[in-house]
Amino acid sequence: MWKKLMTIALTLLVSVSFTGAVWAMEEGNKRKGKYIYRKVYKSCHERGAVETAKPPLNPDAHTQAEWTTIFEGKQFDNFGCEEEWKGLSEDQIVDIYTYLHAHASDSPTPLKCK
């Protein structure tokens, strides 16, 4: 009886732990992220801050762990176009992160911007 109770309690604890972990991970929209990422550099190019409207970093420039570190620390210095990045909402940043993370070099579908 005691073993059965402990098994049930442990099962509930594990279930709650996994549910909490899933809710803690915020996921954005990859398609919106790709659009916003390109739009940032297009407007930056139109402003004359960069030579080309093509984003400087392809999604496969980093691993998924590296993208996570960059976005958790909000280390957007390597991206350039600081003015445009500062103007993005938190949802837009999450969408860009989701796009870059999903197509990182160690992801199942690495992707280069064309």
Image (tube, grey):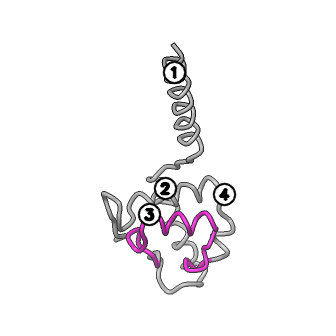
The image quarter containing residue 106 is bottom left
The numbered mark, 2 or 4, whose residue comes first in the sequence reads 4
The numbered mark, 4 or 1, whose residue comes first in the sequence reads 1
- Identify which amino acid the numbered label 1 is placed on: Ile
The numbered mark, 3 or 2, whose residue comes first in the sequence reads 3
Q: Percent position (x, y) of residue 102?
A: 41, 57
Q: Which residues are magenta?
A: 56-81
Q: Percent position (x, y) of residue 34?
A: 45, 60
Residue tagged 4: 89
For label 1, count other residues whose C-alpha is less than 10 Å away and answer few (under 14), some (14-19) or many (20+).
Answer: few
The numbered mark, 1 or 3, whose residue comes first in the sequence reads 1
**Label for residue 83?**
none
Circle 1 SS class: helix
The numbered mark, 3 or 4, whose residue comes first in the sequence reads 3
Is residue 44 or residue 68 the one in the foreground?
68
| Alpha carbons under labels 1 and 3: distance apart | 36 Å
**Label for residue 8?**
1
| Alpha carbons under labels 2 and 1: distance apart | 36 Å
Is residue 18 or residue 65 the one in the foreground?
18
Quarter that holds the C terminus:
bottom left
Residue tagged 3: 64
| Alpha carbons under labels 3 and 4: distance apart | 22 Å
Q: Are the two marked residues, 2 and 1, in contact with CB atoms closer than 8 angstroms?
A: no
Is residue 46 or residue 62 the one in the foreground?
62
For label 2, count other residues whose C-alpha is less than 10 Å away and answer few (under 14), some (14-19) or many (20+).
Answer: many
The stretch drawn in magenta includes residue 69: yes
- Identify which amino acid the numbered label 3 is placed on: Gln
| Alpha carbons under labels 4 and 1: distance apart | 43 Å
